[in-house]
Amino acid sequence: MATAQFSLRALLLPILLLSPAATARSWDYIIVGSGPAGLVLSDRLSATGKSTLLLEAGVASTYASGGREGPSWLRDSNEPLSRFDVPGFFGAFLAHPDGHQCPDIPFPAGCVLGGGSAVNSALWFLPPGGDLPWVDEEEGEAVAKARKKIPGTTNPSMDGKMWFPESFDILGKMMRSLGWSEVDANKEMDRKDRCFARASFGNTDGERGGPLTSYFLAAEKRPNFEIVYGARVERVLRTAGKVVGLEFVRDRKRETVNLAEDGKAILSAGVFGSAKILWQSGIGTRDQLEIIKAVKGDDMIPETEWIDLPVGYNLQDHPATYVVFKYPGVGTAYNYSGAYENPIPEDAQNYLQHRAGPLASSNARISMWHEIKGSDGVVRTLQWNGRTGTAGNFTGPDLLLLTNYLTHGQTTRGRIGLTPGNLNHKILESPYLITKEDVDTVIQSFQEVLEGVKNVEGLELLLPDLATTTIDEFIRNYSLPRGSSHWIGSAAMGSVVDYETKVLGMENLYVVDASILTGATTSNPMGAIVVMAERAAELLTQETWGCDL
Ligand SMILES: Cc1cc2nc3c(=O)[nH]c(=O)nc-3n(C[C@H](O)[C@H](O)[C@H](O)COP(=O)(O)OP(=O)(O)OC[C@H]3O[C@@H](n4cnc5c(N)ncnc54)[C@H](O)[C@@H]3O)c2cc1C
Ligand SMILES: *[C@@H]1O[C@H](CO)[C@@H](O)[C@H](O)[C@H]1NC(C)=O
Ligand SMILES: *[C@@H]1O[C@H](CO)[C@@H](O)[C@H](O)[C@H]1NC(C)=O
Ligand SMILES: *[C@@H]1O[C@H](CO)[C@@H](O)[C@H](O)[C@H]1NC(C)=O
């Protein structure tokens, strides 16, 4: 222990001298990362009046946060909008990442204020009981808080018109023919078996809104809250189990910040980001820590201080499988990727003047849920999201798409780790449909849902093409990418953090983001993550009553 303290002091001292400004004060709360979880915490923790620092690797995003980026037509309009405010640019992040893609993550991931919530389609579904077992008792209250901040809307265009209604109308009709019920997804959250709903968005007044508006702007106003942009945290500085500060790189320079004597450091850097900070802080399995040691040498915390926890395990995503339909009269799909640089002029004007039209949301319009009990006795949920659009080789007119996700209850678990040398993230074990029961469940859901095609006159199934393959074969041989960017796991509650979100073996280090979820969420994850962070904020701000594992 003494060795660790000495080597840490030796390390800290020269840095202290180099950057006195960054270490000028000690913080009660230091949050790392501003995804939806980090934004909820920024608001709720700073509301206590305690000094709260947010360290974010990226830059400001929405106009209100100071972001000014966008295609020239948007900037020239002089509207208070950046690219991150326009919901219809959901596809622009993939086509024009412009430096906001996290450099060390080989999957879509926003390293910018808001994290995923700055670049996603803003689908907003509050979680059913059961998504967050550890908050169940209190979940009601956390859900109510999240709903009050982000009510969500099923009609995001401010002209009140439902744009691109075909996927709801036609696929909803198909589901009704099978006896499925229409529900209000954010009022009847527990109805997830053979139900469908209009897609719900977290947008506000025709703009992205969501956590970036509802939580961040409240925090930013408080004098006890500060954010440092461009600060990529490398590790926590600790003496045995106590964090004394954090080390980050900004403008290629290393800086440190100090945590107050009874302060708390909270990692909200996402499934990949938080795992990497833990590893770089000497917390994780030996194989990963040795990969870092090989790069950092003596700059790494000594092996005697390493804490062996299964960081990187328990990884899940929502494995996606596409279905393509044709229905006469749907017409040509809206070109969302083209709308970033070359929007249809009327649509641009409609958006700029009224926050209305195609650019006021993505074109997702229907969400459906199905529960199936597997031969292993486990109940799994599947979510199906529908929209108009083109997909892969299907580029003609009149197309409707459904994406099937296997969600809550899936039993496949993957694992992430680091690449030796460059320390980029990689998948060590696939999280996609490995267990037999997971595969069987997807096949069963397809069989039941696609039965409905024959009930809707004019509806034609293009993929899978059941003239040349069976559903069973289609699912088993599926070769398109399965990723949906709905990652959870990697610092699971119960094995890496305790039920108060504290890292096992640490006194004042916490993880609050998608990485601590123990199982995939029932729907697109942002709603569940916000609810989880609301509950975590309650725990972080109340006196601890010692409920370690
Ligand atoms: C393209 C895309 C579309 C999606 N669509 C939807 C959708 O429509 N609906 C939905 O519910 N979900 C959607 N998701 C998923 C959703 O956005 C994520 O589940 C959610 O953002 C995860 O939240 P988080 O708080 O765990 O962290 P993240 O959102 O991953 O944020 C992590 C933050 O930490 C920062 N960070 C990382 N490392 C460091 C470091 N070392 N130092 C400092 N800062 C760091 C990052 O810059 C980022 O701001 C989508 C995701 C993507 C990528
Ligand atoms: C969409 O628009 C972009 C840019 O204008 C163009 O390159 C692309 O071919 C268009 N896609 C379709 C399917 O029309
Ligand atoms: C498109 O068609 C080609 C040729 O038939 C095939 O090799 C490819 O896998 C298809 N791509 C998709 C996305 O279906
Ligand atoms: C599916 O895969 C199996 C085994 O790899 C193969 O025999 C079969 O021809 C494939 N079917 C299709 C439709 O590609």
Image (spheres, rainbow, N blue to C red):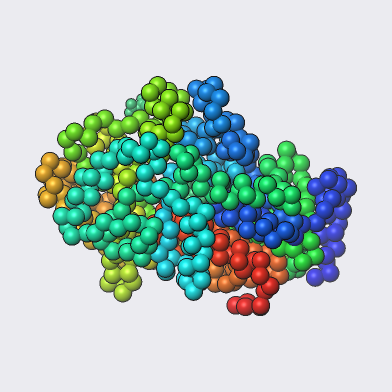
Question: Going by the image, does 485 lie left or right of 75?
Answer: left
Question: Going by the image, does 355 lie left or right of 175?
Answer: right
**Residue 118 at x, y = what percent?**
53, 43
The answer to which image quadrant residue 156 occupies is top left
Question: Going by the image, does 401 lie left or right of 312?
Answer: left
- Residue 242 against residue 210 in the figure, above or below: below
The answer to which image quadrant residue 98 occupies is top right
Question: Going by the image, does 25 lie left or right of 504?
Answer: right
Q: Nearer the viewer, residue 194 or 466?
A: 194
Residue in the picture at 32% in, 69% down: 379
Which quadrant of the figure contains the N terminus? bottom right
- Residue 308 against residue 154 in the figure, above or below: below
Residue in the picture at 40% in, 64% down: 128
Q: Nearer the viewer, residue 449 or 444?
A: 449
**Residue 195 at x, y = what percent?**
27, 59
**Residue 460 at x, y = what percent?**
16, 42
Residue in the picture at 26% in, 30% down: 332
- Residue 379 against residue 78 in the figure, above or below: below
Q: Which of 346 and 300 is in front in this view?
A: 346
Could one spot residue 161 in this view of the protein? yes
